[in-house]
Image (cartoon, helix red, strand yellow):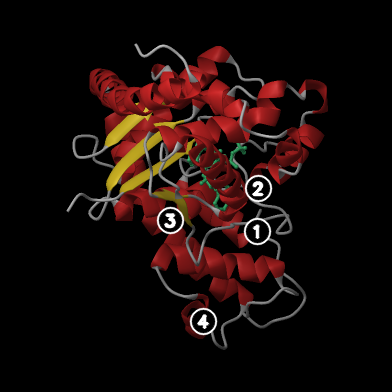
Amino acid sequence: MDKKVIYSAMQPSGVPSLGNYLGALKNWKNLQDEFNCIFAMANMHAITVRQDPSELKKNTRNLLALFLAIGIDPKEHIVYVQSDVRAHAEMSWILNCYTYMGELQRMTQFKDKSAKHEDNINAGLFTYPVLMAADILLYQADLVPVGEDQRQHLEITRDIAERFNNIYGDVFTIPEGYIPKVGARIMGLQNPERKMSKSESDNPNNVIYILDDLNNIANKIKRAVTDSDTEVRYGEDKPGISNLLNIYGAVTGKSIEEAEADFKGANYGEFKKCVADAVVEELRPIQERFKEISADKEYLNTVMAEGAERASKIADKTLAKARKKVGFAVR
Ligand code: ATP
Ligand code: LTN
């Protein structure tokens, strides 16, 4: 039987954070044996906020090197740059005409990002979820591994797909989200009320970037905000400690209960040291491989070219189907 299709993407809007890694990348790696995977660097999504062109280019290549360093196999699976596949823009336009303003107005990411970038609330930021729906639907994905913050975008993707299918018959596979139990929402270390985000630069101690110097990572964890209590316990009243337990659980593959049990009777200092050690040992081999892979420019070029070609083939097939349905010429 054919394997199911996994699709996910990440914006090359900076160096990925520990949140991106635990919420998404680590799971992508683990799903490779069981599924046919397609992973993209979503640079078309990234330009919904202002990017420096040379930085964007550099971040895109680095993100590819990082996907490979984490252990994604570009021979067995498909890894590509979103803007290399023209079908995304075209499908996105078609789907825009099957999406309601009211649906987009409800998106919390749009509300958050327009508050953050008041001077640049562009139409792309508003229709961002439609482009994301186009990404997913072009590849007829069954499962989409993402962090908790993308749940709403997955729901709108399903709604758009169902709406289109109801009019035209079975064009799109209806995708399901794949959101991990532990690690789906890593919060800032200094502000555990808000999610850790790679494009936030106000306070570098709030975010762990996965290519940060390892000593620096350990120090950021040791400086993380906790509370005036002494018990290592998960709870809404303890956002800082809960976040660290979540990080520890996601890195070690333990449940929150198992993570709590590991630190029964431990003080905050001991706890933080263990969390820091676990994160550092997880990231060390990734950083080493990243160094090697990112130096091999030719290899990265080949992977990008092959990825674009293989992805285009699949995407063009779905696009042709949708074009025909809406009454455009079949090319
Ligand atoms: P940006 O800050 O540039 O808006 P981001 O850091 O939120 O980006 P994306 O590139 O939009 O990251 O997301 C990539 C993946 O990482 C998505 O699957 C998203 O759900 C996941 N993710 C992002 N932040 C976190 C977090 N704090 N905890 C868990 N998963 C996260
Ligand atoms: N919007 C996503 C990144 C993204 C994505 C996708 C994720 C773009 N296209 C398709 C899953 C499937 C985000 O994580 N912010």
- Which one is closest to the eye, mark 4 or mark 2? 4
* Residue holding disc 2: 205
Picture residue at 58% right of the left edge, 55% below the top:
148
- Callouts 4 and 2 close, C-beta under 8 Å: no
Which of marks 2 and 4 precedes in the sequence?
2
Residue 216 visible, this angle: no
Q: Is residue 260 left or right of residue 1?
A: right
Find out if the beta carbon at label 1 lies less than 8 Å from the nearest ligand 1 atom.
Answer: no
Residue type marked 2: Asn
Residue type marked 4: Glu
Crowdedness near tag 3: few (<14), some (14–19) or many (≥20) residues, C-alpha within 10 Å: some
Which of marks 2 and 3 precedes in the sequence?
2
Image spot of residue 84 (x, y percent): 39, 18
Image spot of residue 180 (x, y percent): 47, 61
Q: CA distance from mark 4 to mark 2?
A: 27 Å
Image spot of residue 232 (x, y percent): 62, 80
Residue 293's quadrant in the figure? top left
Q: CA distance from mark 1 to mark 2?
A: 8 Å
Q: CA distance from mark 3 to mark 2?
A: 16 Å
* Residue holding disc 4: 257
Residue type marked 3: Val
- Callouts 3 and 2 close, C-beta under 8 Å: no
Q: Front-most of 287 and 38?
A: 38
The answer to whether 294 is drawn above or below residue 329 in the figure is below
Q: Front-most of 46 and 143?
A: 143
Crowdedness near tag 4: few (<14), some (14–19) or many (≥20) residues, C-alpha within 10 Å: few
* Residue holding disc 3: 280
Which of marks 1 and 3 precedes in the sequence?
1
Q: CA distance from mark 4 to mark 3?
A: 22 Å
* Residue holding disc 1: 223
